Image (cartoon, grey):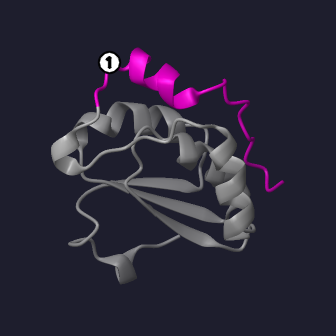
Amino acid sequence: MNGHAAPDLPRQASLNRLRRFDIRPNRELGQNFLIDDNLLKVIGREAELDLTDVVLEVGGGLGVLSEYLAPRVGHLHVVEVDRSLEAPLLDALDPFDNATLHLADAVSLDLPGLRP
C-alpha cells in the first residue's frame, strides 16, 4: 500500500450511507448509486490503477467508489454537482490525504488546473 489505509467497507456501504444521511437519488440529475459491493473489485481490476495514477471520478455520489479508489491511487479528484451529497462524500474522503472533493459541474471544471 501507499500509506493510505484502506477502510473495511461494510457490506453494501451505499445502503448504509443512504440511511445514515437520509438521501434519496435525484432522478432529475440521473443519479444511480453503486449498491453492489462486488462491482468495486471489478472496477478496480479493470481500471488497472496503481499508486502513480491521478484519477478523476465524475459523480462521486455517496463516496463508496471513492473510498475504494483512494488507497489504490496517487491522487483522487472527486467531482460532484449535487451539494446535498457533500456530507457523505466528506465522510468517505476524510481518512485520505490524497483525495480532493470538487463541488462543481465537471463540464465547467478547470481540469488542466487540477493538481496534486
What segment carries the magenta color? 1-24
Give the side of residue 101 with respect to residue 83, left or right.
right
SS state under label 1: loop
Is residue 8 placed above or below 20 in the rendered structure?
below
Q: Residue furthest left?
A: 28
Mainly helix, strand or loop, the magenta region? loop
The residue sitting at 24% across, 35% down in the picture is: 84
Is residue 79 placed above or below 24 in the rendered structure?
below
Q: Position of residue 26 (x, y in %)?
A: 22, 38
Per the image, the residue denoted by label 1 is 22
Q: Position of residue 80 (x, y in %)?
A: 32, 52
Closest to the observer, 56 or 13:
13
Is residue 31 placed above or below 2 in the rendered structure?
above
**Which quadrant of the figure has residue 21?**
top left
The residue sitting at 71% across, 34% down in the picture is: 7
Q: Residue furthest bottom?
A: 112
Q: Is residue 17 magenta?
A: yes
Give the side of residue 32 with respect to residue 9, left or right.
left
